[in-house]
Structures are given as structure tokens and as C-alpha cells.
Amino acid sequence: MPYVSVADEAFTMCKIIVRPYPAKKLTWQQRVNNYRLSKARRYVECGFGILANKWRILHRPIDVSIDMADIIIQACCVLHNFVRHHDGYNFEDTLSCPLESIPAIGTRDNIGVETRNSFKNYFCSPAGSVPWQNRSCNIVA
């Protein structure tokens, strides 16, 4: 599966941004997909909350060039990991993610739909499903 950013309905979907399926009448697979994306977003939001509370520059819009914003965010992440390591947290358990610049691409295409469908199929397959996903969102398959 590709690396993607998980977003809510406010964002336009594209190849690198995945958001939930809209509407109320969803299939079982679409509801599982939405549940799993929602759970992932909660972890990301908690992680960003911890980071933003430590580095106050993240409490407001960063009014700099995109290149400088990349550097500021990377510096915050590096400093955060340094502080965690210095304070005695188990540094090896910290997840790392390569911080690469996201290329500007068109957002009015069907590539995002294909990516979302790939994740939906993976979440509902034996390889990608988890035992609690149906119970947690009250789904009967």
C-alpha cells in the first residue's frame, strides 16, 4: 500500500490524500474503511497535539514559504525525538516516518478514488482486517 495522508471531508482527495466515503448508505466494506481511517486520524491528531503543545509555533498558521515550513516541521520532530530520548523514553519504540516534501499535483482526478478503494479492499481482506473492526463499528458482515 502507498504512503498517504489521512484527511477528513474538508480536503480534496488525490493520490496521496485519502478521506472517508461520504453518504449515509454505505456498504459494509465502505463502513469498515471509514472506521479504520477515523481511528488512524485520532492517533495522528493526538500525536500532533503532543507535538504542538511542546512547540508553540504549531499553535498558529506558519506564515513562511513552503520550504521553510518543511524545515520547521522537521526541526520540531527531530527536537521532539531528542527530548524523548534525553528524558528516558524508550526511543526504539518511537515510530519514525521519512519527512519528504509532498509534491504539488492535480486534485481533480480519479487516482484518489483508486487509492481509497485499494485501502478499502485491504481493510476487508484476511491480510488487512483486524478482529475487532466489525464489533467496534457495529457491522454484521
Image (spheres, rainbow, N blue to C red):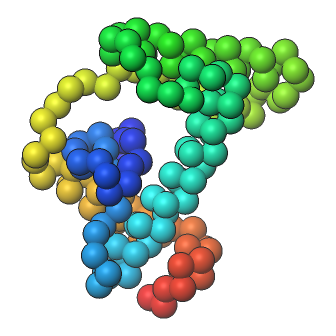
Q: Is residue 103 visible?
A: yes
User: Quadrant where the C terminus lies?
Assistant: bottom left
- Residue 8 sits in which quadrant? bottom left
Residue 125 shows in the view: no
Residue drawn at x 25%, y 24% is: 103
Please name whichever residue, 53 or 19, is drawn nearer the observer in this view of the structure: 53
Where residue 67 appears, as percent x and y from the top left, is: 35, 10
**Image height of 80 relative to 123, above or below:** above
Vertical comparison of 44 with 123: above or below: above
Q: Residue at x 74, y 15 (%)?
A: 82
Residue 5 vs 34, above or below: the answer is: above
The residue located at (48%, 68%) in the rendering is 35
Q: Nearer the viewer, residue 68 or 21?
A: 68
Q: Residue at x 44, y 20 (%)?
A: 62
Asked which quadrant contains residue 100, the reply is top left
**Picture coordinates of residue 16, whole percent (x, y):** 29, 40
Return the x and y of residue 40 as percentages of the image width and height: 53, 53
